[in-house]
Image: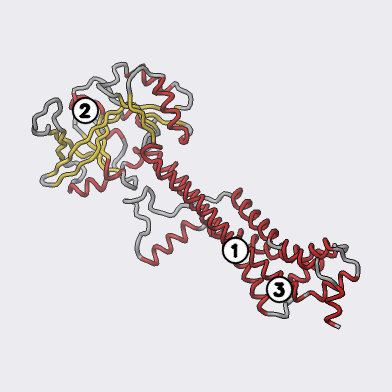
């Protein structure tokens, strides 16, 4: 079978044993470095993809994508405004709410948190908090029983069990004098556990109860969900500008956007740093080929006298270096894909061996190490690493093509 001379000789050089064992060691080190760099880069980016999806699928499912809060008073034309928000392009659901800062008291134990008064019938259009309530759903909230739903950490901190009573304290406003807070008795009808700081900072009551407590006729805020979470800030402004009411405009980007920005920043830094690791491994190919050229000077001189041109000689060493790079990229990609697919289970096993949780659900919004493999990224990483390994062969290949046969054969003689 016909094979080009450069390809045939280059592959023979790649597989042949070197007289100098150090050359073989450097060659293996360069391949191992590429394998390690490619695999770690794939695993790292898959982890960042996992965190990004966990942020979108879990955290952004329990907080509204955007909110509009009236500056003063309440939404007098609440029904029409709600319909206007829901009909806006890009908005998938909306629900009215009232938010207030309160203090919960059970005997001598107290806890400050934000109380969110919601409309149970429409809250599912905006958030998925209901599926994290252990005793049921939003039907647990009612105005007649003054029911309240709290996060598990809050209930534990106050020493409350489902069915027990808790006192809610609100400050008295409208006067410069210091007055005793108003007290309202509530019954704990349910607890939720979503993970992260939300469990310790948020509680839920029925919106009609909040209207009664604050002497309001309508909601003070409207929360809505959008189909593209990354456009939440833009859509919230578009919706707000279409409503003739002075409002505060909020979105998840202003409250939780730092998490997304951190993930993107870490992903970019990881990509650059680990590509530099791959670059260092690729430049070990330079050392390998330089020593290989010095070892094969006589062979190169003979090939030149037999009529091999400079580009054929250059191609021989480019093939030799590219072969090392190709082997490293293939094995690195396979290792990286395997680790990325099984990363969550490997991390869980490691936690079991340590006997402790490295990612606490009480601090972070997830308690596991997520991973999502993107095969497009795998091909890009392997392709870039291979190109870098080919580029690393240019200098030694050029050096080999400039060897003068007369001098080399003369010295050997």
Q: Position of residue 287 (x, y in %)?
A: 67, 70
* N-term mark: 2 or 1: 2
Question: Dot 1: what SS?
Answer: helix
Closer to us: 366 or 3: 3
Q: Furthest residue to the right?
A: 306
- Which mark is on residue 291? 3
What distance separates the C-alpha of mark 3 from that of mark 1?
17 Å
Q: Is residue 222 depicted above or below 305 in this figure?
A: above
Query: For the point 61% across and 68% down, which residue is it?
Result: 32
Find residue 311 and report its image quarter.
Answer: bottom right
Q: Position of residue 71 (x, y in %)?
A: 28, 24
Question: Dot 2: what SS?
Answer: helix
Query: For the point 38% across and 53% down, which residue is it?
Result: 367
* N-term mark: 3 or 1: 1
What distance separates the C-alpha of mark 2 from that of mark 1?
65 Å
- Which mark is on residue 209? 2
Q: Is residue 70 depicted above or below 345 in this figure?
A: above
* N-term mark: 3 or 2: 2
- Which mark is on residue 96? none
Query: For the point 80% across and 66% down, which residue is it?
Result: 401
Q: Mark 1 Cα within 10 Å, few/some/many (few <14, many 20+)?
A: some
Q: Furthest residue to the front?
A: 407
According to the image, label 1 marks what residue?
280
Question: Dot 3: what SS?
Answer: helix
Judged by depth in the image, the label closer to the viewer, 3 or 2, is 3
């Amino acid at each position: 079978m016909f094979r080009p001379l450069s390809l045939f000789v280059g592959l023979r050089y790649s597989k042949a044993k070197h007289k100098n064992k150090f050359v073989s060691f450097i060659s293996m080190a360069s391949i191992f470095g590429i394998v390690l760099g490619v695999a770690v880069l794939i695993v790292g980016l898959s982890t960042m993809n996992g965190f990004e999806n966990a942020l979108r699928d879990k955290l952004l499912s329990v907080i509204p994508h955007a909110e509009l809060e009236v500056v003063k008073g309440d939404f007098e034309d609440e029904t029409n405004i709600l319909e206007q928000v829901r009909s806006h392009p890009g908005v998938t659901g909306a629900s009215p709410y009232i938010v207030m800062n309160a203090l919960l008291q059970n005997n001598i134990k107290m806890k400050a948190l934000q109380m969110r008064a919601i409309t149970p019938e429409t809250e599912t259009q905006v958030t998925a908090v209901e599926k994290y309530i252990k005793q049921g759903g939003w039907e647990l909230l009612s105005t007649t029983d003054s029911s309240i739903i709290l996060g598990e950490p809050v209930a534990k901190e106050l020493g409350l069990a489902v069915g027990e009573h808790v006192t809610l304290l609100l400050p008295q406003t409208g006067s410069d004098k210091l007055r005793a807070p108003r007290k309202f008795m509530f019954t704990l009808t349910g607890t939720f556990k979503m993970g992260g700081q939300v469990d310790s900072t948020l509680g839920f009551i029925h919106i009609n109860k909040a209207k009664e407590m604050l002497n309001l006729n309508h909601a003070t805020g409207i929360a809505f969900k959008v189909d593209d979470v990354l456009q939440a800030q833009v859509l919230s402004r578009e919706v707000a500008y279409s409503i003739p009411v002075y409002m505060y405009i909020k979105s998840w980007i202003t409250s939780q956007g730092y998490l997304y920005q951190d993930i993107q920043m870490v992903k970019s830094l990881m990509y650059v740093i680990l590509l530099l690791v791959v670059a260092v491994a690729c430049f070990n190919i330079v050392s390998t080929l330089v020593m290989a050229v010095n070892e094969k000077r006589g062979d190169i001189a003979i090939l030149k006298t037999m009529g091999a041109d400079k580009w054929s000689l250059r191609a021989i060493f480019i093939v030799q270096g590219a072969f090392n790079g190709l082997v490293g990229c293939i094995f690195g990609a396979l290792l990286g894909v395997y680790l990325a697919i099984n990363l969550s289970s490997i991390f869980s096993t490691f936690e079991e061996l340590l006997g402790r949780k490295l990612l606490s659900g009480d601090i972070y919004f997830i308690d596991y190490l997520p991973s999502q493999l993107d095969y497009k990224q795998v091909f890009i990483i392997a392709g870039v690493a291979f190109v870098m390994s080919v580029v690393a062969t240019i200098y030694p290949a050029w050096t080999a093509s400039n060897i003068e046969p007369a001098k080399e054969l003369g010295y050997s003689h």
